[in-house]
């Protein structure tokens, strides 16, 4: 391979770093999903580690999603107010992941564990897919 496959998939320059950061966040979310699906028994630091991993992924995802939504909105021709509204909507959608992770990891409500785990898993995948879609629309051909 001569290295041209990176340019084919991700574009040149900083696009590779941006896609790499997004993929790292997705891997962190998948690690959190793995922890969420585990049934912890007894004292363990797994929950704490899960929340640290999730907090890292969430913090970086907020920055990436905000920039992606703003770029995408400006690219498709939305004005300043519409762009601001879409960014706020994206933050609300991102905030739902906190509800889902608390549903998925709270043993005090066992009836919410399975729906929370499913919703958190799907939400993590859809956040990644949505960011990829916006980047696909933004990236120069």
Image (spheres, grey):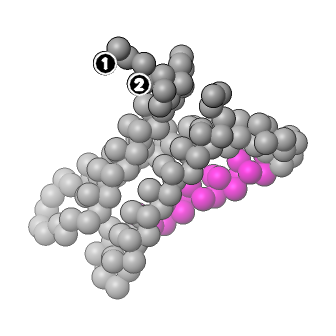
Q: Does 100 appear in magenta?
A: yes
Q: Is residue 99 visible?
A: yes
Residue 48 at x, y percent in the picture? 27, 52
- In the rendered image, residue 105, in percent from the top left (x then y), is placed at 32, 67
Residue that badge 2 annotates:
5
Disc 2 to disc 1, how far (Cα)?
A: 8 Å
Q: Is residue 88 magenta?
A: yes
Asked if the residue at tag 1 contacts the one at tag 2, i.e. Cβ–Cβ closer than 8 Å, the answer is yes
Q: Is residue 118 above or below residue 48?
A: below
Residue 16 visible to the viewer: no
Disc 1: which residue: 1
Quadrant placement of the N terminus:
top left
Q: Which range of residues does the magenta coloring cover?
A: 84-101
Q: Label 2: few (<14), some or many (≥20) within 10 Å?
A: few
From this view, report whether residue 48 is shown above or below residue 99: above
Q: 91 or 73: which is nearer to us? A: 73
């Amino acid at each position: 391979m001569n290295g041209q496959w990176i340019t084919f998939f991700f574009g040149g320059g900083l696009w590779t770093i941006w896609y790499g950061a997004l993929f790292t966040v997705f891997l962190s979310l998948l690690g959190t999903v793995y922890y969420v699906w585990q049934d912890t028994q007894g004292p363990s630091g797994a929950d704490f580690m899960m929340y640290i991993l999730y907090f890292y992924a969430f913090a970086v995802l907020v920055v990436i999603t905000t920039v992606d939504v703003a770029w995408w909105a400006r690219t498709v021709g939305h004005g300043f107010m519409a762009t601001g509204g879409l960014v706020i909507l994206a933050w609300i959608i991102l905030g739902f992941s906190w509800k889902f992770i608390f549903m998925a990891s709270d043993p005090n409500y066992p009836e919410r564990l399975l729906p929370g785990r499913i919703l958190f898993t799907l939400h993590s995948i859809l956040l990644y897919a949505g960011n990829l879609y916006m980047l696909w629309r933004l990236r120069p051909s």
